[in-house]
Amino acid sequence: MRITQLFNIQYPIIQAGMVWASGWKLASAVSNAGGLGIIGAGSMSPEILREHIQKCKAATAKPFAVNLPLLYQHIEQQVAVIIEEKVPIVFTSAGNPKTWTPHFKEAGIKVVHVVSSSKFAVKAEEAGCDAVVAEGFEAGGHNGREETTTMVLVPLVVNAVSIPVIAAGGIATGRQMLAAFALGAEGVQMGSRFVASREASSHINFKNLVLQAGEGDTQLALKQLTPVRLLKNEFYQQVQAAELRGAGKDELMQLLGKGRARMGMFEGNLSEGELEIGQVSALIKDLPPAADIVQRVWEEFEVARKELATYRATP
């Protein structure tokens, strides 16, 4: 597989870089289990990011990555830290890949960009990215305005680019991974499934709420700002009420305020915090170690693949 060769990993299973959930403990646990662990830099200052990178290096001898949202402050300092610390792989998102990809490539770093459309996938390939993540709108957190589902997005992106495609959005089991491979993906990235792991740095209150989530308990909101998929809580209800009465960007920005995501996902305020999680949370009902998740998903994938190979058309 091109993805396992590109990243030098055993399984084509990648843990997404989620804000307030994916620190060095989770990243190193996933990498040690044979997947690709990712440190989520979106919620980190440059100093904290350096600390997590160094601790991850000490905890695993295997490859790991940093996820870098390009819209955040301190981007120049974060890029400098990543290069200075010789991080082998960077996943970029929420911005133009042409801006920083050449800098990373010059430093010998492999670059993957997260996209929500085939148009942006082509731009990522043209920018020199080694692979793309095609993330459907089932995914938690920040999302594409196109609202294209993973089932539709992945084959569109596969047809549009020649570099490897990693499927994301609504994937938490081996059977879903097999479906993504049938669409042409060569790896999968999972966020929500790894939020509900023992090593995730998200608050236990948030993790437990994810385990209780059912169908329809998440919704894409704040489309006038940056679309984000949230669990429905009191904060979400305030956002929905504001949007229904036609609130503008300024009012929504004031409602969102600062630190809302930290309040919910890291500090465990389940009523007033911003709780980012994907639709697939409805399938997640346990809180295992990250290594168990990697092994379980791969075993489910193998079982489903063998079952599928026995199917025959009825004469």
Image (tube, helix red, strand yellow):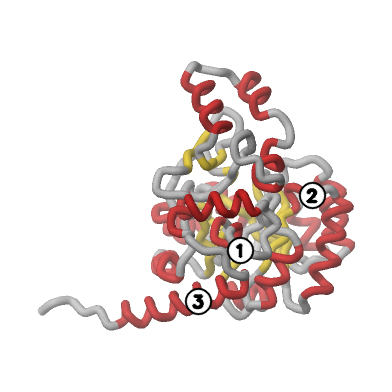
Q: Where's residue 180, x and y in %?
A: 44, 65
Q: Are marks 1 and 2 in contact (CB under 8 Å)?
A: no
Q: Check disc 2 and give the amino acid type.
A: Met
Which residue sits at x=21%, y=79%?
312
Mark 3 vs mark 1: give the one in front.
1
Q: Check disc 3 and give the amino acid type.
A: Trp
Q: Between marks 3 and 1, how big is the CA–CA gap?
A: 16 Å
The answer to which quarter of the image holds residue 179 is bottom left
Which residue sits at x=13%, y=77%?
314
Q: Where's residue 163, x and y in %?
A: 57, 65
Using the image, determine if residue 118 lies above or below residue 26: above
Question: For mark 2, what is the residue?
Answer: 44
Using the image, determine if residue 204 lies above or below residue 7: above
Label at residue 61: none
Per the image, label 2 sits on a secondary structure element best described as loop
* Lower position in the chain sequence, tag 2 or tag 3: 2
Q: In the figure, is residue 105 to the left or right of 297?
A: right
Question: For mark 3, what is the residue?
Answer: 298
Residue nearer the viewer, 237 or 111: 237
Label at residue 197: 1
The quarter in which the C terminus is drawn is bottom left
Residue nearer the viewer, 204 or 61: 204
Q: Check disc 1 and give the amino acid type.
A: Ser
The answer to which quarter of the image holds residue 307 is bottom left
For label 3, count other residues whose C-alpha is less than 10 Å away and answer few (under 14), some (14-19) or many (20+). Answer: many
